[in-house]
Amino acid sequence: MIVANNIKKIKSILKIQKTANQVIGFVPTMGSLHKGHLSLVKMAKSKSDFVVVSIFVNPIQFSQGEDYQNYPKNIKTDINLLKEEGVDLIFCPHPRDMYPIDFSVFVDETELSEVLCGKSRSGHFRGVCTVLVKLFNIILPDKVYFGQKDYQQALIVKRLIDNLNYDIRMYYLPTIRDKDKLAMSSRNRYLKDNERLDSLCINEALSLGRKLIQQGETRVFVIVDKMKNVIIKKRTAKIVYIEILDAINLKNLKIVKGKILIALAVYINGTRLIDNTVINVK
């Protein structure tokens, strides 16, 4: 396994793999790895000849006042986990190499990014799209892997790949949850014991939304209101959004129909957590 932070070195290594017609699989991460990340790595290993994982806490996808400086970091543990999984190359660039002092080119997606996290995190998806374009251009992957917990991001990345004519096949895998049903996230490390218990209201609200739809409720405002009532009972919880949208294009719905996305973002005593579920409604 190779660990490198130099962009020219990474390109040189991967040029050799491309010349040998190796299928390059790529898993972009911000580190602080958990089983959700590792499920993506395992899938990449099964479908690729050469697997690359990036570890880079991308500064330009954090809004002012967010947790960029405090974002969990444990590079040694991450490297050991990836070594156990048989990853071939780990790319750990430095921010000044990714964004030199004269950096002034950014990539925007202007439709799917206008709702949900894009509405509540100014510039977030601009930062995500920009760093992914840079990583795709450096690594030239054949296949990339993302998780459903970041459903909106996955849709945006698919749009980016299609609109910018990248010859990349994208996979996105189901959300991995802990035994208590909380979606795995690097930010879960912020939670104290009582906050962890309160955070379970997120999956509880999603489960209620699914149940109401299965019981025949079709009015979006009714489902959302009942989900909100689950969250607000927890002292540490503050709702950012709870929305039910078309899962294909993220358009607003008044009545649930077809493939729908129930998505929510909640602060648990300052820790921002997201989750979602996708349902096919006949």
Image (cartoon, rainbow, N blue to C red):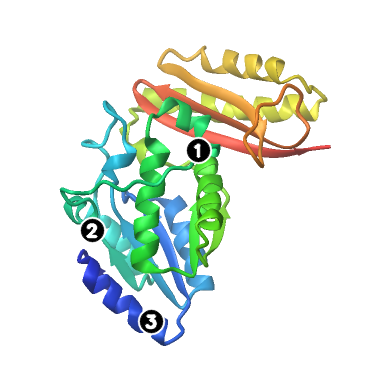
Residue 27 visible within the image: yes
CA distance separating discs 3 and 2:
20 Å
Asked whether disc 1 touches disc 2, contact meaning CB atoms under 8 Å apart, the reply is: no
Residue behind mark 1: 110
Label 3 or label 2, whichever comes before in sequence order: 3
Tell me the kind of residue under disc 1.
Thr
Which quarter of the figure is the C terminus placed in?
A: top right
Asked whether disc 3 touches disc 1, contact meaning CB atoms under 8 Å apart, the reply is: no
* Viewer-closest of 219 and 205: 219
Tell me the kind of residue under disc 3.
Gln
Residue behind mark 3: 17
Which quarter of the figure is the N terminus placed in?
A: bottom left
Kindly indicate the quadrant of the structure image that contains residue 197.
Answer: top left
Spot occupied by residue 166 in the image (x, y as percentages of width and height) = 50, 63
Identify the residue shown where x is 79% and y is 22%: 217
Label 3 or label 1, whichever comes before in sequence order: 3
Name the front one of labels 3 and 1: 1
Spot occupied by residue 71 in the image (x, y as percentages of width and height) = 27, 39
CA distance separating discs 3 and 1:
35 Å
Tell me the kind of residue under disc 2.
Pro
Identify the residue shown where x is 36% and y is 27%: 271
CA distance separating discs 1 and 2:
27 Å
Residue behind mark 2: 93
